Image (cartoon, rainbow, N blue to C red):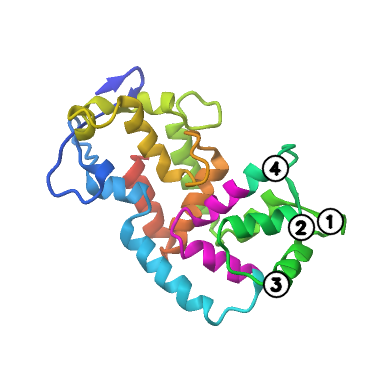
């Protein structure tokens, strides 16, 4: 279905889907919004399981503090690094994007990161380059992300721009209204969820459990897919997955 110049997906129940948000099938122009697509958008449970197993295994031999923290985040799944970022952002009361050591240590503890104080001090010192007792947590999170090729980053941002219909730099419920008709979702039809709850459930895929604000920034979107990317070996497969999932 066309809405203005954009596609709008009308979803109907689809038997056999293993993803609660993905129990749907798009009608019109042979576009399928089924289990496979929604599981891809959520990082897929299979990839998350494999990544968690690999990360826990590597953690037993890793010695570098940055690598150990990265592996602990990835052991939580695709949204692990993004979740730590959300915890740091909550503590940044004055919105200056920096943390002192006390805030940094509290953030790690709040996120249940297993790390000795001495190891945390070494990690902090690596990022406190000018020795003023604070670190830029954007730079910190950027370093913590698993490395991604330029091609992967570009396709991730293509997907973000497609969802950001208003072009204001964040994905919101209003953006989703332009591409997805929530009234065909099974849980809306049976009265379990409101239309807004359907949209929020989708956005929650990208949100941290510590701070679900219903907004997804480019940074959060990139952090989320950096986690997904860590479980996929080749650029070709990752790009095909993204283009298929988002109809790029």
Secondary structure under tag 1 reads loop
User: How many angstroms separate mark 2 from mark 4 (CA)?
Assistant: 12 Å
User: How many angstroms separate mark 4 from mark 3 (CA)?
Assistant: 22 Å
Give percent across and percent down for residue 182.
28, 28
State the residue position of label 1: 133
Circles 2 and 1, Cβ within 8 Å, touching? The answer is yes
Would residue 21 appear left or right of 154 to someone viewing this image?
left
Q: Main secondary structure of the magenta part?
A: helix
State the residue position of label 4: 92
Secondary structure under tag 4 reads loop
Residue 103's disc number:
none
Looking at marks 2 and 3 on the same chain, the residue that comes earlier in the sequence is marked by 2
User: How many angstroms separate mark 3 from mark 1 (CA)?
Assistant: 16 Å
Q: Nearer the viewer, residue 9 or 152?
A: 9
Please report the bounds of the magenta region as a residue range. 66-87
State the residue position of label 2: 101
- Quadrant placement of the N terminus: top left
Secondary structure under tag 2 reads helix
Looking at marks 2 and 4 on the same chain, the residue that comes earlier in the sequence is marked by 4
Q: Nearer the viewer, residue 247 or 182?
A: 182
> Residue shown at 48%/39% (left/top)?
212
Residue 119's disc number:
3
């Amino acid at each position: 279905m066309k809405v203005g110049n954009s596609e709008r997906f009308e979803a109907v129940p689809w038997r056999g889907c293993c993803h609660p948000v993905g129990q749907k099938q798009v009608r019109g122009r042979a576009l399928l919004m089924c289990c496979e697509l929604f599981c891809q958008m959520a990082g897929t449970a299979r990839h998350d399981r494999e990544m968690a197993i690999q990360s826990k295994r590597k953690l037993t031999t890793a010695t570098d503090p940055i690598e150990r923290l990265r592996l602990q985040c990835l052991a939580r799944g695709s949204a692990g690094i993004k979740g730590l970022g959300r915890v740091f952002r909550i503590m940044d009361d004055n919105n200056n994007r920096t943390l002192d050591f006390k805030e940094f240590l509290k953030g790690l503890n709040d996120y249940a990161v297993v790390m000795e104080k001495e190891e945390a001090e070494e990690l902090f010192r690596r990022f406190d380059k000018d020795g003023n007792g604070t670190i830029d947590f954007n730079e910190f999170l950027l370093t913590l992300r698993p490395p991604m090729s330029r091609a992967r980053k570009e396709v991730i941002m293509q997907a973000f721009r497609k969802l950001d219909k208003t072009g204001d730099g964040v994905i919101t419920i209003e953006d989703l209204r332009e591409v997805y008709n929530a009234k065909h979702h099974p849980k809306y039809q049976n009265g379990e969820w409101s239309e807004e709850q359907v949209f929020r459930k989708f956005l929650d895929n990208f949100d941290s459990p510590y701070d679900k604000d219903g907004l997804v920034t480019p940074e959060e979107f990139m952090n989320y897919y950096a986690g997904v990317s860590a479980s996929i070996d080749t650029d070709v497969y990752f790009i095909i997955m993204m283009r298929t999932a988002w109809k790029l």
